[in-house]
Image: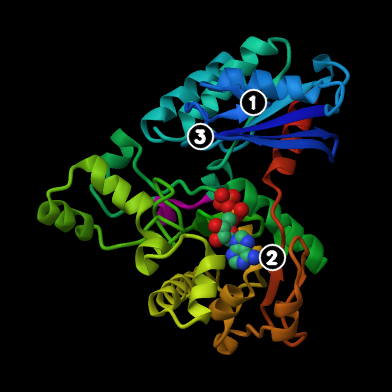
Amino acid sequence: MKVLVLNCGSSSIKYKLYDDDQQLAEGLLEKIGTAQAQLNHTVILEHQAGIELILKALVDPEKGVLTSIEDIQAVGHRVVHGAESFSESTLITPEVVAKIEECIDIAPLHNPPNLAGIYSISYLLPKVPQVAVFDTAFHQTMPEKAFIYAIPYVFYTRNHIRKYGFHGTSHYFVSHEAAAILGRPIDELKLITCHLGNGSSITAVDHGKSVDTSMGFTPLEGLPMGTRCGDVDPAVPLYIMGKEELNLQQINALLNKHSGVLGISGISNDFRALEEEADKGDKRATLALEVYCYKLKKYIGSYIAAMNGADAIVFTGGIGENSDVVRELVVKDMEFLGIELDADKNHAKRRGEAGDISMPSSRIKVLIIPTNEELVIARDTRRIAAAN
Ligand code: ADP
């Protein structure tokens, strides 16, 4: 079955076309909403125009991979927030669209572009079944003690404020791949999956189920990230707002766009640049790497405590898959927990390569597993479209 996978962000559309598990094409369309948005040199001002151009490119006689647009049998969408309404991927019906629209209130940046993709396909390919795959769904198995914040309970019941968690599709994918590498069924395993990219999150996966994760009500909580602050004392933004006379929008931008390793280093949100500057002796680049890795180490310790052990720690995402420096800083000096990194294997891993980088004697294995969220979306879409 040929499935088009769409990941519609606020100003970009990433797409991949699959025939069963085989990827036929992929592309990225950027800067939607600005005059610089280009695919084949055409100005694109909104998502529907962008998707029309993607469909055209897929059937282009020279560069395309399809003979007709009718060959697309289903479309899968990444949808960021499904709140408590969705614990698994689902066929998109008018009722489902209405529920995703209800979530706009708690995901104002993410769900509107995802919906724009759904509306566009409904218009452009009205007969093709569409499936929504949610970033939050995998984490719906978290117990209440892990997702309730210690604020008045009425904010949960009335305003739906709780920890939701994100990157669920990636944590799901790499935990299943880890079980395959370890040669054991997932329902026997305790795993800690670290998705480290521009956004970073860590999840405790107990017997295949997410039981805790670092991102929260929004993707701002948890680990420090490229430009996001992660956990800070909640009094800090209040204090800064008062001192600097910042409004809500400004403090939001400060915590989301100017913090994280960029904020600490003053250099970059890109770990390649930070590692380079740290090598040259830049103190704040070194500090940014140390803060990031120390926080991750503490989360790993807390998830080992939460699950009463762990069989493996998995690194994925642009940083997790590529940075031997980060992996080493995170797991070194944890021998007392049974974690022993093989430094040679850690350095030798090449991009896109999966494998075990721990010593044979390591009680907790350390794995690198390239993530593939689009493949999960394509598989779920195929399964759900075929059953309907
Ligand atoms: P996203 O979260 O947007 O999907 P990725 O998972 O692709 O992002 O991660 C992108 C980040 O990965 C970059 O910002 C950079 O910090 C980091 N990265 C990519 N390649 C390397 C590398 N070779 N060494 C260290 N960090 C890298």
Residue under the image location 47 percent in, 28 percent down: 34
Q: Quadrant of the N terminus?
A: top right
Residue 115 to residue 243: above or below: above
Frontmost residue, 275 versus 2? 275
Q: CA distance from mark 2 to mark 3?
A: 27 Å
- Disc 1 packing (10 Å; few <14; some 14–19; many ≥20): few
- Per the rendering, the mark at residue 82 is 3
Q: Quadrant of the C terminus?
A: top right
Task: Evaluate whether residue 192 shows in this view.
Answer: no
Say which element carries label 2. Answer: loop
Magenta residues span 142-147
Picture quadrant of residue 14: top right
**For the residue with label 1, is its CB less than 8 Å from the closest atom of ligand 1?**
no
Residue named by callout 2? 189
Say which element carries label 3. Answer: loop
Residue 194 is one of the magenta-drawn residues: no
- The amino acid type of the residue labelled 3 equals Gly
Q: Is residue 149 left or right of residue 178?
A: left
Q: Report the number of discs.
A: 3
Main secondary structure found in the magenta portion? helix
Q: CA distance from mark 3 to mark 1?
A: 35 Å
- Per the rendering, the mark at residue 41 is 1
